[in-house]
Amino acid sequence: MALVSFVGRVLFASVFILSAWQEFNEFGVDGGPAAKALKPKFNVFSKTVTAHTGVEVPEFDIKVLVAAAVAFKGVGGILFIFGSSIGAYLLALQQVIVTPILYDFYNYDTEKKEFGLLFSKFSQNLALLGALLFFIGMKNSIPRRQLKKKAPKTKTV
């Protein structure tokens, strides 16, 4: 069963690791295509958050967000393979931050083609987040192995 669990973690983490690898290779000096796709969506997200909450989202270079996402996916994926909860937390944090910004189906009319595509991707990322939360919950619910205390050896005379 341990082998099946390990293979499952490798297959699951490969989604994040391969994505991180691709974004890392395309990063360049400007953040690559990921930054170009994320910038307008982040601007719309910032305006929406400010309009609805009154809290202004601070401005920063979008390539910093892309670099953080690459790091979270890469490091989190590798740690996740070895069964680390920290890896799962990194991947979950990345999903929570990036998913509502990148897959902004809520900004489109339900009749438009973009709505369906973005909602589908958003739903897939929610499923990944759910699997990560399940892993974290299961990892925290398994009792830690207790070291058995050995009875001291007595000397026989």
Image (cartoon, rainbow, N blue to C red):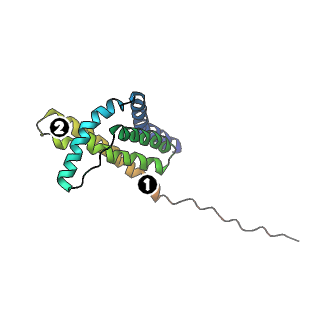
As drawn, 53 above or below 108? below
> In the rendering, at what x and y percent does residue 111 appear?
10, 37
Q: Residue at the right extreme?
A: 157
Cβ–Cβ under 8 Å for marks 2 and 1: no
Local packing at callout 2 (Cα closer than 10 Å; few below 14, some 14-19, many 20+) is some
Residue 130 can be seen, yes or no: yes
> In the rendering, at what x and y percent does residue 61 appear?
33, 40
- Spatial separation of the CA atoms under disc 2 and disc 1: 34 Å
Q: Is residue 144 left or right of residue 153?
A: left
Q: Earlier in the sequence, mark 2 or mark 1?
A: 2
Camera-nearest label, 2 or 1: 2
Q: Mark 2 is on which residue type?
A: Phe
Dot 2 falls on a residue whose secondary structure is helix
The residue under label 1 is 138
> In the rendering, at what x and y percent does residue 7 appear?
48, 38
Quarter of the image with the C terminus is bottom right
As drawn, 12 above or below 143? above
What residue is drawn where x is 29% and y is 40%?
124
Local packing at callout 1 (Cα closer than 10 Å; few below 14, some 14-19, many 20+) is few
The residue lying toward the viewer, choosing from 81 and 145, is 81
The residue lying toward the viewer, choosing from 35 and 120, is 35
Q: Mark 1 is on which residue type?
A: Met
What residue is drawn where x is 47% and y is 51%?
85
Q: Is residue 152 left or right of residue 38?
A: right
Q: Is residue 48 left or right of residue 61?
A: left
The residue under label 2 is 115
